[in-house]
Amino acid sequence: EPGRHQGAAQDARRAVDLLLKVAEPGTFSSTLGRAYLALGRALGSQGEGEQARQALGSAFENLKAALGADHPDTRAAMELLDSAAQPH
């Protein structure tokens, strides 16, 4: 399923790019956070560890600021980020 994961990463990257174009600089968004979360998941499934960690870090930052640390999406981003940071 490499093509499917690559398509998912491309779609998520497009979503992130579009959302960044309309975002106010310095603001946080749950929508942007979820797009970064999808990107991080897709990149992680492709074995793109460093890029996945960057996307997951941005997801966590946006989701924590917009939804709070206890929100399920924020926790999911943090868990994936922790997992991506562990040596395999």
Image: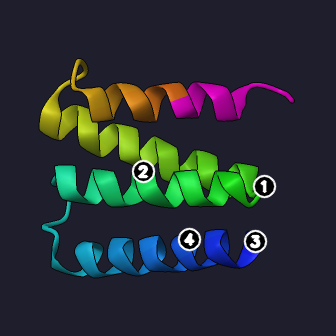
Q: Is residue 8 above or below residue 57?
A: below
The 10 Å Cα crowd at callout 1, few under 14, some 14 to 19, many 20 or more, is few
| Residue depth check, mark 4 versus mark 3: number of the one nearer the observer | 3
Residue with the most extreme top position = 70
In terms of sequence position, does the residue under pointer 4 or pointer 1 come before the other? 4
Residue 5: image quadrant is bottom right
Q: CA distance from mark 4 to mark 2?
A: 11 Å
Query: Residue 47's x, y, as percent?
Result: 78, 55
Say whether marks 2 and 3 touch (CB < 8 Å): no
Residue at the disc numbered 2? 37
- Amino acid beneath label 4: Ala
Q: Which of the numbered marks, if any, corresponds to residue 2?
A: 3
In terms of sequence position, does the residue under pointer 2 or pointer 3 come before the other? 3
- Amino acid beneath label 2: Leu
Secondary element type, mark 1: loop
Residue at the disc numbered 4? 9
The residue drawn where x is 45% and y is 78% is: 11
Residue 73 on the magenta segment: no
Report whether residue 28 is seen: no
